[in-house]
Amino acid sequence: MKARLAALSLAVVIAALLGRSEAASPTQIATSPSPRWSSPPLLAMTDEAIATASVPSLGLRTGFDLATTDEAPIPPPQPEPLAQLSEPYELFRGDRAHPRVALTFDCGPWVNPGYIKAILDSLDDYGHRVTFFVTGEFLEKHGRLFATRMVRHEIANHSYSHPNFPRLPAERIQQEMRWTEELAAGLGATTRGIWRAPFGARTPRELYIAAEEGYPLHVMWSTDSGDWTTRSADYVRATTLNRAVNGAVVVHHCNSWQTAAVLGSILWQLREWGIGVVTVSEVMG
Ligand SMILES: [Zn+2]
């Protein structure tokens, strides 16, 4: 009996140690090395992480030389968790009352035209309207495809060159978003209102900068399809479908061969189940 108790308490201690070693603090996350655009969302933060993160950089004017404009003064930094603030707003999952999911597609600087065309074909087959988060570099390279086939969808801002926003000065972040909006406008669309940080990497500072630029809604996700990894197309399909709960926001990528291969199958199954496919705006209810 004693031996069993000893083994049990040892297991508890080991579990506690493991649990501690796995928990990454917001500070550790924020200092991760700069990832490439196709890397996993290393800096993605949970609600809890945001709520507990220190917010000394919350004020836009702090640390940046923007105080010489004639604009009305911005209120001083508010040392309260983001969840208590009305603006900006961050979406992880939408309306849970209805069987609808928002499919979102991030278009980074490098996209194989064959993959994005296959994705657009599948969406057209089912008549679905979804949300594309486009980079300016994508728009420069695939402007014709965008203007002819993508503008019917909801378009949102994913920066110009897909840099790591928390490492950039405010002026550069503003430029990244403005350049992309200008390119989209030149192609008959607008990215206004909705954005997603490259890599999902953002702190309260970037959320406020974007909100001031006309992008109050930052969209994260409830389901990472895993289509940016080396996992199989079947994995991407199963992950998307297994987590297709009411209001799910799923992230896919325009340059994913896996998504290009299985999106039609995903859309067929969702229709069989009676689950709607909608844009980010629509899934909010
Ligand atoms: Zn991206």
Image (cartoon, rainbow, N blue to C red):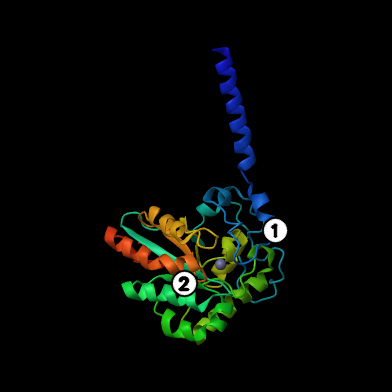
Residue 10 placement (x, y as % from top left) = 61, 24
Residue at the image point whose x is 57% and y is 65% from the top: 197
Mark 1 lies within 8 Å of ligand 1 (Cβ measured): no
Which quadrant: the N terminus? top right
Residue at the image point whose x is 50% and y is 84% from the top: 185
Quick one: SS at disc 1? loop
- Measure how far apart labels 2 and 1 are at the Cα level: 27 Å
Res 87 seen here = no
> Is the residue 228 above or below the residue 152 in the image?
above
Ligand 1 found in image quarter: bottom right
Amino acid type at circle 2 is Phe
Residue 66 placement (x, y as % from top left) = 68, 72
Q: Residues within 10 Å of mark 2 (few under 14, many from 20)?
A: many
Res 85 seen here = yes
What is the number of the mark on residue 33? 1
Where on the picture, by quarter, is residue 174? bottom right
Which quadrant: the C terminus? bottom left
Residue 233 placement (x, y as % from top left) = 46, 61
Amino acid type at circle 1 is Pro
Figure label count: 2
Where on the picture, by quarter, is residue 238? bottom left
What is the number of the mark on residue 217? none
Quick one: SS at disc 2? strand
Residue at the image point whose x is 36% and y is 64% from the top: 265
Where on the picture, by quarter, is residue 74? bottom right
Q: Which residue is mark 2?
A: 132
**Does the residue at mark 2 contact the one at mark 1 (Cβ under 8 Å)?**
no
Pointer 2 or 1: first along the chain: 1
